[in-house]
Amino acid sequence: MSALRNPLVASLLRRMPHGGDAPTGAVDHRVRALRAQYDDIGDFLMRHHLDLGEANYAIARAHLAGDPVVSAQVAGLLREHGHLTDAMLARLATPADRGLSPELVGEMAERMARDLAECVRIIAASQSSGIEYRAALSAEVTGFAADPMGALDRLIRLTNGVVEATRTMEEQLEVAREEAERLRTNLRRAQRDADRDHLTGLPNRRHFEMRLNAVPRDRPAVVALCDIDDFKNVNDQHGHGTGDRVLKFVARLLRSELGDHAVVARYGGEEFVCLFEGYDVDQAVALVDGARERLVSRSLANQQTGRTIGRLALSAGVAAVVGDARDALRLADTALYAAKRAGKNRVVVAPRAD
Protein backbone atom coordinates (compact mmCIF):
# COMPACT_ATOMS: atom_id res chain seq x y z
CA MET A 1 0.00 0.00 0.00
CA SER A 2 1.44 3.36 -1.04
CA ALA A 3 2.17 5.88 1.68
CA LEU A 4 0.20 8.41 -0.35
CA ARG A 5 -2.95 6.28 0.09
CA ASN A 6 -2.73 6.37 3.86
CA PRO A 7 -5.69 8.60 4.96
CA LEU A 8 -3.60 10.63 7.40
CA VAL A 9 -0.74 11.10 4.89
CA ALA A 10 -3.23 12.11 2.23
CA SER A 11 -4.63 14.66 4.67
CA LEU A 12 -1.15 15.95 5.38
CA LEU A 13 -0.31 16.25 1.68
CA ARG A 14 -3.55 18.07 0.93
CA ARG A 15 -2.35 20.74 3.32
CA MET A 16 0.92 21.12 1.42
CA PRO A 17 1.29 23.39 -1.66
CA HIS A 18 1.56 21.13 -4.74
CA GLY A 19 4.35 21.91 -7.17
CA GLY A 20 5.09 18.57 -8.83
CA ASP A 21 7.29 15.73 -7.64
CA ALA A 22 9.42 16.13 -4.56
CA PRO A 23 12.87 17.54 -5.31
CA THR A 24 15.79 15.14 -5.56
CA GLY A 25 18.25 17.82 -4.51
CA ALA A 26 19.13 21.48 -4.44
CA VAL A 27 20.49 21.32 -8.00
CA ASP A 28 17.22 19.91 -9.39
CA HIS A 29 15.29 22.63 -7.61
CA ARG A 30 17.47 25.39 -9.06
CA VAL A 31 17.27 23.91 -12.57
CA ARG A 32 13.48 23.71 -12.41
CA ALA A 33 13.28 27.24 -11.04
CA LEU A 34 15.54 28.54 -13.82
CA ARG A 35 13.54 26.78 -16.51
CA ALA A 36 10.31 28.14 -15.06
CA GLN A 37 11.80 31.65 -15.05
CA TYR A 38 12.75 31.37 -18.73
CA ASP A 39 9.29 30.06 -19.57
CA ASP A 40 7.62 32.91 -17.70
CA ILE A 41 9.78 35.53 -19.44
CA GLY A 42 9.07 34.03 -22.85
CA ASP A 43 5.33 33.85 -22.15
CA PHE A 44 5.33 37.49 -21.03
CA LEU A 45 7.11 38.72 -24.16
CA MET A 46 4.97 36.63 -26.51
CA ARG A 47 1.72 37.59 -24.80
CA HIS A 48 2.50 41.28 -25.39
CA HIS A 49 4.01 40.72 -28.87
CA LEU A 50 7.38 42.09 -27.77
CA ASP A 51 10.73 41.47 -29.45
CA LEU A 52 13.12 39.12 -27.67
CA GLY A 53 15.84 41.74 -27.29
CA GLU A 54 18.26 42.36 -24.44
CA ALA A 55 16.39 45.40 -23.12
CA ASN A 56 12.96 43.72 -23.27
CA TYR A 57 14.36 40.58 -21.64
CA ALA A 58 15.87 42.63 -18.79
CA ILE A 59 12.61 44.51 -18.19
CA ALA A 60 10.53 41.31 -18.30
CA ARG A 61 12.93 39.53 -15.95
CA ALA A 62 12.91 42.42 -13.45
CA HIS A 63 9.12 42.71 -13.62
CA LEU A 64 8.48 38.99 -13.11
CA ALA A 65 11.09 38.84 -10.33
CA GLY A 66 9.17 41.52 -8.47
CA ASP A 67 11.43 44.54 -8.90
CA PRO A 68 9.30 47.17 -7.10
CA VAL A 69 10.12 50.01 -9.47
CA VAL A 70 9.87 48.12 -12.76
CA SER A 71 6.73 46.24 -11.72
CA ALA A 72 5.01 49.47 -10.75
CA GLN A 73 5.98 51.06 -14.07
CA VAL A 74 4.76 48.08 -16.10
CA ALA A 75 1.51 47.97 -14.15
CA GLY A 76 1.04 51.69 -14.77
CA LEU A 77 1.54 51.27 -18.53
CA LEU A 78 -0.96 48.43 -18.62
CA ARG A 79 -3.51 50.45 -16.69
CA GLU A 80 -3.06 53.45 -18.95
CA HIS A 81 -2.76 51.75 -22.37
CA GLY A 82 -4.02 48.23 -21.86
CA HIS A 83 -0.98 46.81 -23.70
CA LEU A 84 2.80 47.10 -23.97
CA THR A 85 5.05 47.96 -26.91
CA ASP A 86 8.79 47.79 -27.56
CA ALA A 87 8.93 51.59 -27.43
CA MET A 88 7.28 51.66 -23.99
CA LEU A 89 9.78 49.16 -22.59
CA ALA A 90 12.67 51.05 -24.18
CA ARG A 91 11.71 54.09 -22.11
CA LEU A 92 11.65 51.95 -18.98
CA ALA A 93 15.15 50.69 -19.76
CA THR A 94 16.58 54.21 -19.26
CA PRO A 95 14.37 55.73 -16.55
CA ALA A 96 14.83 59.41 -15.79
CA ASP A 97 13.45 59.12 -12.29
CA ARG A 98 13.02 56.01 -10.20
CA GLY A 99 11.51 57.69 -7.17
CA LEU A 100 9.29 55.97 -4.60
CA SER A 101 5.84 57.09 -5.72
CA PRO A 102 2.61 56.41 -3.79
CA GLU A 103 1.69 53.89 -6.49
CA LEU A 104 4.97 52.06 -5.95
CA VAL A 105 4.44 52.00 -2.20
CA GLY A 106 1.02 50.46 -2.80
CA GLU A 107 2.44 47.82 -5.14
CA MET A 108 5.10 46.89 -2.60
CA ALA A 109 2.58 46.74 0.23
CA GLU A 110 0.42 44.33 -1.80
CA ARG A 111 3.41 42.13 -2.56
CA MET A 112 4.43 42.14 1.09
CA ALA A 113 0.92 41.15 2.14
CA ARG A 114 0.81 38.28 -0.37
CA ASP A 115 4.25 36.99 0.59
CA LEU A 116 3.46 37.21 4.28
CA ALA A 117 0.16 35.37 3.79
CA GLU A 118 1.98 32.59 1.91
CA CYS A 119 4.56 32.22 4.68
CA VAL A 120 1.83 32.12 7.34
CA ARG A 121 -0.07 29.49 5.34
CA ILE A 122 2.96 27.22 5.02
CA ILE A 123 3.85 27.58 8.70
CA ALA A 124 0.25 26.90 9.74
CA ALA A 125 0.20 23.79 7.55
CA SER A 126 3.43 22.62 9.17
CA GLN A 127 2.05 23.11 12.67
CA SER A 128 -1.22 21.36 11.87
CA SER A 129 0.56 18.47 10.17
CA GLY A 130 2.83 18.01 13.17
CA ILE A 131 -0.16 17.85 15.50
CA GLU A 132 -1.89 15.25 13.34
CA TYR A 133 1.26 13.19 13.03
CA ARG A 134 1.79 13.17 16.79
CA ALA A 135 -1.84 12.13 17.34
CA ALA A 136 -1.58 9.29 14.82
CA LEU A 137 1.75 8.17 16.24
CA SER A 138 0.32 8.16 19.77
CA ALA A 139 -2.65 6.09 18.64
CA GLU A 140 -0.41 3.50 16.98
CA VAL A 141 1.84 3.27 20.03
CA THR A 142 -1.21 2.77 22.27
CA GLY A 143 -2.47 -0.12 20.11
CA PHE A 144 0.94 -1.61 19.50
CA ALA A 145 0.50 -4.46 22.02
CA ALA A 146 -2.71 -5.69 20.37
CA ASP A 147 -1.29 -5.80 16.82
CA PRO A 148 2.48 -5.25 16.88
CA MET A 149 3.19 -6.25 13.28
CA GLY A 150 0.27 -4.29 11.87
CA ALA A 151 1.13 -1.27 13.99
CA LEU A 152 4.76 -1.43 12.91
CA ASP A 153 3.75 -1.59 9.24
CA ARG A 154 1.40 1.36 9.66
CA LEU A 155 4.06 3.34 11.52
CA ILE A 156 6.55 2.76 8.70
CA ARG A 157 4.03 3.84 6.06
CA LEU A 158 3.00 6.81 8.16
CA THR A 159 6.60 7.91 8.69
CA ASN A 160 7.46 7.51 5.00
CA GLY A 161 4.45 9.59 4.07
CA VAL A 162 5.34 12.32 6.52
CA VAL A 163 8.93 12.35 5.22
CA GLU A 164 7.56 12.87 1.72
CA ALA A 165 5.20 15.59 2.90
CA THR A 166 8.00 17.25 4.85
CA ARG A 167 10.24 17.23 1.78
CA THR A 168 7.52 19.01 -0.18
CA MET A 169 7.09 21.53 2.60
CA GLU A 170 10.85 22.15 2.79
CA GLU A 171 10.88 23.02 -0.90
CA GLN A 172 8.02 25.46 -0.42
CA LEU A 173 9.66 27.01 2.63
CA GLU A 174 12.88 27.46 0.66
CA VAL A 175 10.94 29.24 -2.08
CA ALA A 176 9.29 31.42 0.57
CA ARG A 177 12.68 32.16 2.14
CA GLU A 178 14.14 33.19 -1.22
CA GLU A 179 11.11 35.36 -1.91
CA ALA A 180 11.41 37.02 1.50
CA GLU A 181 15.11 37.70 0.90
CA ARG A 182 14.37 39.18 -2.53
CA LEU A 183 11.66 41.35 -1.03
CA ARG A 184 13.99 42.54 1.72
CA THR A 185 16.61 43.49 -0.89
CA ASN A 186 14.00 45.37 -2.91
CA LEU A 187 12.76 47.17 0.18
CA ARG A 188 16.27 48.28 1.07
CA ARG A 189 16.77 49.61 -2.44
CA ALA A 190 13.38 51.31 -2.40
CA GLN A 191 14.21 52.92 0.93
CA ARG A 192 17.47 54.22 -0.51
CA ASP A 193 15.64 55.46 -3.59
CA ALA A 194 13.04 57.18 -1.44
CA ASP A 195 15.75 59.26 0.21
CA ARG A 196 17.78 60.03 -2.90
CA ASP A 197 17.55 62.69 -5.59
CA HIS A 198 17.97 60.71 -8.77
CA LEU A 199 19.54 63.46 -10.85
CA THR A 200 22.30 64.57 -8.51
CA GLY A 201 22.66 61.55 -6.24
CA LEU A 202 22.31 63.79 -3.19
CA PRO A 203 19.82 63.16 -0.40
CA ASN A 204 16.44 64.64 -1.31
CA ARG A 205 14.16 67.02 0.54
CA ARG A 206 12.33 64.20 2.32
CA HIS A 207 15.56 62.81 3.75
CA PHE A 208 16.87 66.24 4.68
CA GLU A 209 13.74 67.18 6.61
CA MET A 210 13.85 63.84 8.41
CA ARG A 211 17.45 64.52 9.46
CA LEU A 212 16.62 68.09 10.45
CA ASN A 213 13.69 67.02 12.63
CA ALA A 214 15.92 64.45 14.34
CA VAL A 215 18.43 67.05 15.60
CA PRO A 216 18.31 67.11 19.43
CA ARG A 217 16.99 70.36 20.86
CA ASP A 218 20.13 70.87 22.95
CA ARG A 219 22.52 70.38 20.03
CA PRO A 220 23.62 73.46 18.05
CA ALA A 221 22.70 73.31 14.38
CA VAL A 222 22.53 75.62 11.37
CA VAL A 223 20.70 75.35 8.05
CA ALA A 224 21.76 77.00 4.79
CA LEU A 225 19.62 77.33 1.67
CA CYS A 226 21.68 77.77 -1.50
CA ASP A 227 20.29 78.76 -4.89
CA ILE A 228 22.16 78.93 -8.22
CA ASP A 229 21.94 82.48 -9.51
CA ASP A 230 20.29 83.01 -12.91
CA PHE A 231 19.96 79.28 -13.51
CA LYS A 232 17.02 79.89 -15.83
CA ASN A 233 19.42 81.48 -18.30
CA VAL A 234 21.39 78.25 -18.50
CA ASN A 235 18.26 76.28 -19.42
CA ASP A 236 17.06 78.93 -21.86
CA GLN A 237 20.38 79.38 -23.67
CA HIS A 238 21.83 75.87 -23.53
CA GLY A 239 18.86 73.54 -23.02
CA HIS A 240 17.61 71.47 -20.12
CA GLY A 241 20.14 68.71 -20.74
CA THR A 242 22.95 71.16 -20.05
CA GLY A 243 20.97 72.51 -17.12
CA ASP A 244 20.85 69.02 -15.62
CA ARG A 245 24.61 68.64 -16.04
CA VAL A 246 25.14 71.99 -14.30
CA LEU A 247 22.98 70.85 -11.40
CA LYS A 248 25.06 67.69 -11.08
CA PHE A 249 28.26 69.72 -11.21
CA VAL A 250 27.10 72.06 -8.44
CA ALA A 251 25.93 69.08 -6.38
CA ARG A 252 29.38 67.48 -6.65
CA LEU A 253 31.08 70.73 -5.71
CA LEU A 254 28.89 71.30 -2.64
CA ARG A 255 29.32 67.71 -1.54
CA SER A 256 33.09 67.99 -2.00
CA GLU A 257 33.37 71.31 -0.17
CA LEU A 258 30.78 70.76 2.58
CA GLY A 259 30.14 67.02 2.77
CA ASP A 260 32.55 66.48 5.67
CA HIS A 261 30.74 69.12 7.71
CA ALA A 262 27.09 68.95 6.72
CA VAL A 263 24.25 66.97 5.23
CA VAL A 264 24.04 68.40 1.69
CA ALA A 265 20.74 67.75 -0.10
CA ARG A 266 18.87 68.89 -3.16
CA TYR A 267 15.85 70.84 -1.96
CA GLY A 268 14.16 71.25 -5.33
CA GLY A 269 14.86 72.84 -8.70
CA GLU A 270 18.19 74.68 -8.52
CA GLU A 271 18.02 74.94 -4.72
CA PHE A 272 20.26 73.00 -2.34
CA VAL A 273 20.12 72.84 1.44
CA CYS A 274 22.76 72.07 4.07
CA LEU A 275 22.44 70.99 7.70
CA PHE A 276 25.42 71.71 9.94
CA GLU A 277 25.14 69.82 13.23
CA GLY A 278 27.45 70.92 16.03
CA TYR A 279 28.37 74.18 14.24
CA ASP A 280 27.50 77.77 15.04
CA VAL A 281 26.33 80.32 12.48
CA ASP A 282 29.74 81.91 11.94
CA GLN A 283 31.34 78.54 11.21
CA ALA A 284 28.57 77.58 8.79
CA VAL A 285 28.76 80.93 7.00
CA ALA A 286 32.50 80.55 6.51
CA LEU A 287 32.06 77.08 5.01
CA VAL A 288 29.20 78.06 2.70
CA ASP A 289 31.01 81.21 1.59
CA GLY A 290 34.09 79.12 0.80
CA ALA A 291 31.98 76.85 -1.42
CA ARG A 292 30.47 79.91 -3.10
CA GLU A 293 33.93 81.30 -3.88
CA ARG A 294 35.04 77.92 -5.20
CA LEU A 295 32.06 77.82 -7.54
CA VAL A 296 32.44 81.35 -8.86
CA SER A 297 36.11 80.72 -9.62
CA ARG A 298 35.18 78.06 -12.18
CA SER A 299 34.32 78.86 -15.79
CA LEU A 300 32.11 76.26 -17.44
CA ALA A 301 31.51 75.30 -21.06
CA ASN A 302 28.89 73.21 -22.78
CA GLN A 303 30.89 70.12 -23.71
CA GLN A 304 28.40 69.11 -26.39
CA THR A 305 28.41 72.39 -28.30
CA GLY A 306 31.63 74.00 -27.12
CA ARG A 307 29.73 77.16 -26.18
CA THR A 308 30.85 78.95 -23.03
CA ILE A 309 28.43 78.88 -20.13
CA GLY A 310 30.57 81.22 -18.09
CA ARG A 311 30.90 81.55 -14.37
CA LEU A 312 28.21 80.32 -12.03
CA ALA A 313 27.38 81.91 -8.72
CA LEU A 314 25.07 81.08 -5.88
CA SER A 315 23.25 82.96 -3.18
CA ALA A 316 22.66 81.51 0.26
CA GLY A 317 20.62 82.20 3.37
CA VAL A 318 21.82 80.88 6.71
CA ALA A 319 19.85 80.48 9.95
CA ALA A 320 20.41 78.87 13.32
CA VAL A 321 18.09 76.05 14.34
CA VAL A 322 16.34 77.25 17.46
CA GLY A 323 13.16 75.50 18.56
CA ASP A 324 10.99 74.48 15.60
CA ALA A 325 13.15 73.33 12.69
CA ARG A 326 10.58 74.70 10.23
CA ASP A 327 11.19 78.18 11.58
CA ALA A 328 14.89 77.82 10.75
CA LEU A 329 14.07 76.85 7.16
CA ARG A 330 11.66 79.76 6.85
CA LEU A 331 14.29 82.20 8.17
CA ALA A 332 16.96 80.75 5.87
CA ASP A 333 14.60 81.16 2.91
CA THR A 334 13.96 84.78 3.84
CA ALA A 335 17.71 85.38 4.11
CA LEU A 336 18.24 83.73 0.72
CA TYR A 337 15.87 86.13 -0.98
CA ALA A 338 17.53 89.00 0.82
CA ALA A 339 20.80 87.85 -0.76
CA LYS A 340 19.11 87.83 -4.18
CA ARG A 341 17.74 91.33 -3.71
CA ALA A 342 21.13 92.59 -2.55
CA GLY A 343 22.78 91.60 -5.83
CA LYS A 344 23.21 87.80 -5.64
CA ASN A 345 26.46 85.87 -5.25
CA ARG A 346 26.57 86.30 -1.48
CA VAL A 347 25.67 84.71 1.84
CA VAL A 348 23.16 86.43 4.14
CA VAL A 349 22.53 85.48 7.76
CA ALA A 350 18.97 85.53 9.07
CA PRO A 351 18.26 87.42 12.28
CA ARG A 352 18.06 85.05 15.23
CA ALA A 353 14.46 84.07 16.04
CA ASP A 354 13.11 85.26 19.37
Image (cartoon, grey):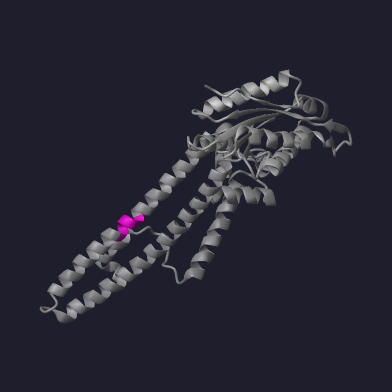
Q: Position of residue 141 (x, y in %)?
A: 16, 74
* Quadrant of res 295: top right
- Viewer-proximal residue, 167 or 232? 232
User: Is residue 268 among the parts visible in the rendering?
Assistant: no
Magenta span of residues: 122-126
Is residue 171 found left or right of 56 in the rendered image? left
- Viewer-proximal residue, 117 or 50? 117
For the N terminus, the image quarter is bottom left
Is residue 175 found left or right of 251 in the rendered image? left
* Quadrant of res 245: top right
Q: Position of residue 70 (x, y in %)?
A: 58, 44
Q: Position of residue 351 (x, y in %)?
A: 60, 22
* Quadrant of res 69: top right
The residue furthest top is 341
State how many labels appear: 0
User: Is residue 130 among the parts visible in the rendering?
Assistant: yes
- Examine the residues drawn in magenta and state their main secondary structure: helix
Q: Magenta span has 206?
A: no
Q: Position of residue 204 (x, y in %)?
A: 60, 36
Residue at x 70%, y 22% (from the top left corner): 339
- Viewer-proximal residue, 260 or 240? 260
Is residue 228 found left or right of 60 in the rendered image? right
Residue at x 28%, y 59% (from the top left corner): 127
Residue at x 70%, y 39% (from the top left corner): 254
- Viewer-proximal residue, 352 or 292? 352
